[in-house]
Amino acid sequence: MKTISPLAIVPFVSVDNMMRLVLSVGVERFLVELAAYIEEDFCRWPTFDKTPRIASHSVDGVIELMPTSDGALYGFKYVNGHPKNMREGKQTVTAFGVLADVGSGYPMLLSEMTLLTALRTGATSAMAARRLAPNSTSTMAIIGNGAQSEFQALAFRALLGIRDLRLYDIDPSATEKCRRNLASLGFAITVCRSGQEAVEGANVITTVTADKQYATILTDNMVGSGVHINAVGGDCPGKTELHRDILTRSSIFVEYAPQTRIEGEIQQLPADHPVTEFWEVLRGTAPGRTSPGEVTLFDSVGFAIEDFSALRYVRDKLAGTPFYQELDLLADPDEPRDLYGMLARAELAAT
Amino acid sequence: MKTISPLAIVPFVSVDNMMRLVLSVGVERFLVELAAYIEEDFCRWPTFDKTPRIASHSVDGVIELMPTSDGALYGFKYVNGHPKNMREGKQTVTAFGVLADVGSGYPMLLSEMTLLTALRTGATSAMAARRLAPNSTSTMAIIGNGAQSEFQALAFRALLGIRDLRLYDIDPSATEKCRRNLASLGFAITVCRSGQEAVEGANVITTVTADKQYATILTDNMVGSGVHINAVGGDCPGKTELHRDILTRSSIFVEYAPQTRIEGEIQQLPADHPVTEFWEVLRGTAPGRTSPGEVTLFDSVGFAIEDFSALRYVRDKLAGTPFYQELDLLADPDEPRDLYGMLARAELAAT
């Protein structure tokens, strides 16, 4: 109907193109570079507009919008969480996001973020563990072997060199799926029959279960001194994974305290229980791990800045690649005030 | 790389396809049908999750997310407002939106909304005026002849039969653009040299200017008894069009009071100044116009439910048409917990 102007075009990264991009970079290199972008943005934390995510809860799940801005770029993610989806052959979590130019308000990138969220979640966990886990960490327990588990494993190997994994899931077929995917990548894997067995000898314990309920994946006796707990699965009101007694003897690190108080493990604690926002560890304004025997806990719920970093990274990596399509998303009349005229001319052109 | 599953696909309506859809329906019929969808949703107002829009303000403009849900469908719009864009050949307002299934959290429709917002804004104004304007309304003044003006004119003709227009803009070239577009459509148009001249003999006054500032497009003496004011342009903090004295002698109708108190003309009034949410007029639980001499004011800022209605309407109209593309937006692994496996198989398929 009309020639589409460059001003009207927004690059779009489909799931298929995201896979191509990730594979062309290499998954582990992608995770390392992405973690560097996240760390860079965490280091300029005060620059960002921060708001807890905007959630729309329903019986079966939640739909959320997660916006943030650094004053030059604006990003947001749409993400759902529907644990029942898995039983219907759908993803528990799907997501897409947009990066936009604050100066003009024009979107600059639309991207799938189901895969990208899985990658940024693993990258964020490993970025935090690199500062919080004990020295000479070699073995990680992964409790919950669903869609996120392999990305955690790959990120911890890429960033911390962890190769020994102890896997447990209440569903043995999930563990078998995770084992199969990771075994061919050179991990040393122990399949465990309980959470208790999984944590034996592990310096890092990752909990990444999906049920939307108060669960007790880890009890207090399962957590030995010096361990780093990477708690990923408890991420909305009413959904936790750790027994309260673990929390009260851990040094707790969070992304953005106002959001984590609502959504994280610390929803079990009084609102004034001391926690450290992780960016302060990166900036050196708060201590990370202070002794070998300390139990550190990264109570991760996922924050908008991580998605912003991921979109920013993808935008930078896309340049010069064929891994995007051009979407005619924005109206661009010849004269900006003549939106109606654009429609009228389209009609003329069609007749 | 892989065959794309139907579960992964989201229909996308580009600007070009939105124009095709609108033209295939006919602009005025589109406005009438769209107004009916908006009215239907206003009539079930208490059903909706309502929240003021989430705005990210910057020096040059604002980027907003406007979500809402009726419990079965969820919708949100991304929209910017950057008055300076016009000087750079860009749109002041661009927008896109998503409709999603609350049950699964899966997006069902991605659509351009720059054009659609222009249409829904006109439809909403005319829907309200149909209940609030005096009987035998024949003449409308339109002050501000930018991108929204023609859509206002078309909506008021389609819903109220108004054919006589009096146009004024501080920029005569905007008025000439508006006149040219509308003259060929059978309107009787008077080009005016001032706002004062434009309002002479008009039963409806539409103000739809774009500057982001406290302006006084209408002073008190310009508003005669019995007039309906359709105030569209004042729609964010610090941006108003009417002198305060007009507000204090008008019966004021708004979309969603908590948002309009922040963004509308009534930001000039105390927070307890009485206003009526328009849905109550539609439901018969609050009066609309009560006398011929009353000055009625629809202080419209645009609310998420109108965009929700517009997305719902577009989704219904799309069925059976070719006016959309299929976007590979959602990851759909063969086994939902095997997101990593999807990536691994893509790699195998590529080698």
Image (cartoon, coloured by chain):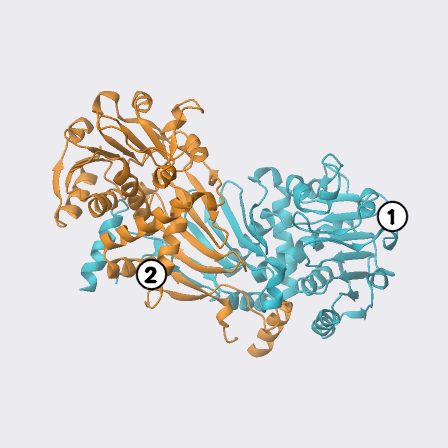
Chain colours: A cyan, B orange
Which amino acid is tagged 2? Lys
Which residue does the image show at 45% across and 25% down from the upper left? B271
The answer to whether the residues at label 2 and label 1 have Cβ atoms under 8 Å apart is: no
Q: Where is residue A235 in the image (x, y as percent from the top left)?
A: 66, 51
Label 1 crowd (10 A; few <14 / some 14-19 / many >=20)? few
- Residue B125: tell me if it is visible: yes
Q: Position of residue B276 (x, y in %)?
A: 38, 32
Q: Which of A155 and B180 is in front in this view?
A: B180
Q: Name the residue under label 1.
A: A292
- Splitting the image into 4 quarters, where does residue B59 fall? top left
The answer to whether A215 is drawn above or below residue A16 in the figure is above
- Residue A105: tell me if it is visible: no
The answer to whether A159 is drawn above or below residue B70 in the figure is below
Q: Where is residue B37 in the image (x, y as percent from the top left)?
A: 35, 51
User: Which dot, 2 or 1, sits closer to the camera?
Assistant: 2
- Splitting the image into 4 quarters, where does residue B145 fall? top left
Which residue does the image show at 22% across and 20% down from the upper left? B221
Q: Mark 2 points at which residue?
A: B317
Subunit under mark 2: B
Q: Where is residue B213 in the image (x, y as percent from the top left)?
A: 35, 29
Which amino acid is tagged 1? Pro
Which quadrant, please, contains the C terminus of chain B? bottom right
Q: Distance between the residues labelled 2 and 1?
A: 64 Å
